[in-house]
Image (cartoon, rainbow, N blue to C red):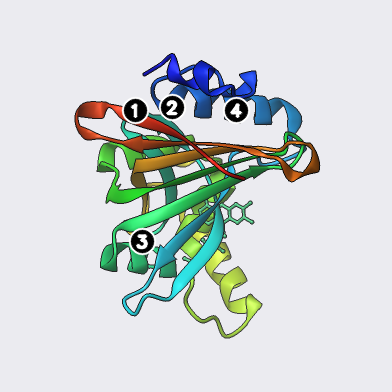
């Protein structure tokens, strides 16, 4: 299977891997060198109970054989939608590199231990913000939010241990499909899609641009 990419005559930027993770890791590392900000940013699409899609930007916090990890407020719209329909799609676009990666699959919650470890790594202001924000709920004024931030700053002063809020955790997206897109002249772009088969085997397929 690994030789098939070369046989397909793709740009060498695609490499020659039998699974999508190594290529994803190379491309996101290259984005880290080239993008002016947020190289880990991606659009996350979710779908609600009546099939209405919704998309928003998030930051990727992990990419391993197990899947792709992001963190958020568990009372948010996205979390509500993921509980209702635990399938999602991610789309990365790196403007400097003119590359896109599109990933779809099913999601599960990360472990409390993993969420605790990541939350502890955040800076103090972000931890306080996670307590203060009722993400995606209606807010009567900006002042209401600022007051909540002040209250949590007083409760958890700089230098104190800020516990992870019970409503804040992460999701792991286990991919069933990962598509790599590379810009080419005259819109003759290159697309390679990996589709998960049984037993961790991935099928590779070219798509017309
Ligand atoms: C570049 C960028 C990165 C973001 N990263 C996150 C993130 O990692 N987690 C998060 O909850 N919201 C993040 N946001 C905010 C979300 O886009 C969104 O406004 C928020 O999560 C509420 O979405 P929801 O109402 O669909 O749940 C980010 C926004 C931008 C523009």
Q: Are marks 2 and 1 in contact (CB under 8 Å)?
A: yes
Q: Position of residue 186 (x, y in %)?
A: 80, 42
Q: Ligand 1: which quarter?
A: bottom right
Q: Earlier in the sequence, mark 3 or mark 2?
A: 2
Q: Is residue 196 left or right of residue 24?
A: left
Q: Which part of the image, by quadrant, shows the C terminus?
A: top right
Q: Which residue is mark 4?
A: 27
Are circles 4 and 3 on residues that touch, CB within 8 Å? no
At 19% across and 28% down in the image, what residue appears? Answer: 199
User: The residue tagged with tag 4: helix, strand or loop?
Assistant: helix
Residue 65: mark in rendering:
1
For the residues labelled 2 and 1, the Cα–Cα distance comes to 7 Å
Question: Is label 2 in contact with label 4 (beta carbons under 8 Å)?
Answer: no
Cα–Cα gap, marks 4 and 3: 30 Å
Mark 3 lies within 8 Å of ligand 1 (Cβ measured):
no
Q: Residue 129 vs residue 65: left or right?
A: right
According to the image, label 2 marks what residue? Answer: 21
Answer with mark 2 or mark 1, whichever residue precedes in sequence: 2
The alpha-carbon separation of the residues under discs 4 and 1 comes to 16 Å
Q: Image check: 21 left or right of 86? A: right
Q: Which of the 4 image quarters holds residue 97?
A: top right
Measured in 3D between alpha carbons, the distance from the residue under mark 3 to the one under mark 2, in whole angstroms, is: 27 Å
Q: Which residue matches tag 3?
A: 74
Distance from disc 3 to disc 1, alpha carbons, whole Å, reads 24 Å
Q: Position of residue 114 (x, y in %)?
A: 32, 36
Looking at this rendering, what residue extends furthest in the top direction? 3
Examine the image and state in which quarter residue 64 appears: top left
Q: Position of residue 77 (x, y in %)?
A: 42, 70
* Frontmost residue, 205 versus 72: 205
Categorize mark 4 by other alpha carbons within 10 Å: few (<14), some (14-19), many (20+): many
**Tag 3: Cα neighbours inside 10 Å, few (<14), some, or many (≥20)?**
many
């Amino acid at each position: 299977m690994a030789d098939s990419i070369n046989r397909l005559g793709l740009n060498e930027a695609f490499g020659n891997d039998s699974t999508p993770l190594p290529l994803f890791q190379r491309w996101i590392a290259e984005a880290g060198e080239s993008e002016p900000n947020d190289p880990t940013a991606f659009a996350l699409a979710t779908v609600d109970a009546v099939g209405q899609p919704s998309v928003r930007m998030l930051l990727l916090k992990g990419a391993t054989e197990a899947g792709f990890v992001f963190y958020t407020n568990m009372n948010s719209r996205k979390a509500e939608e993921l509980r209702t329909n635990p399938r999602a799609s991610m789309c990365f676009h790196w403007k400097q590199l003119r590359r896109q990666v599109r990933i779809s699959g099913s999601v599960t919650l990360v472990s409390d231990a993993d969420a605790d470890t990541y939350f502890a790594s955040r800076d103090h202001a972000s931890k306080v913000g996670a307590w203060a924000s009722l993400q995606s709920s209606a807010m009567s004024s900006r002042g209401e939010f600022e007051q909540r931030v002040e209250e949590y700053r007083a409760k958890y002063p700089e230098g104190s241990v800020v516990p992870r809020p019970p409503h804040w955790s992460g999701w792991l997206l286990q991919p069933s499909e990962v598509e790599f897109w590379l810009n080419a002249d005259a819109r003759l772009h290159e697309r390679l899609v990996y589709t998960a088969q049984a037993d961790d085997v991935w099928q590779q397929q070219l798509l017309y641009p």
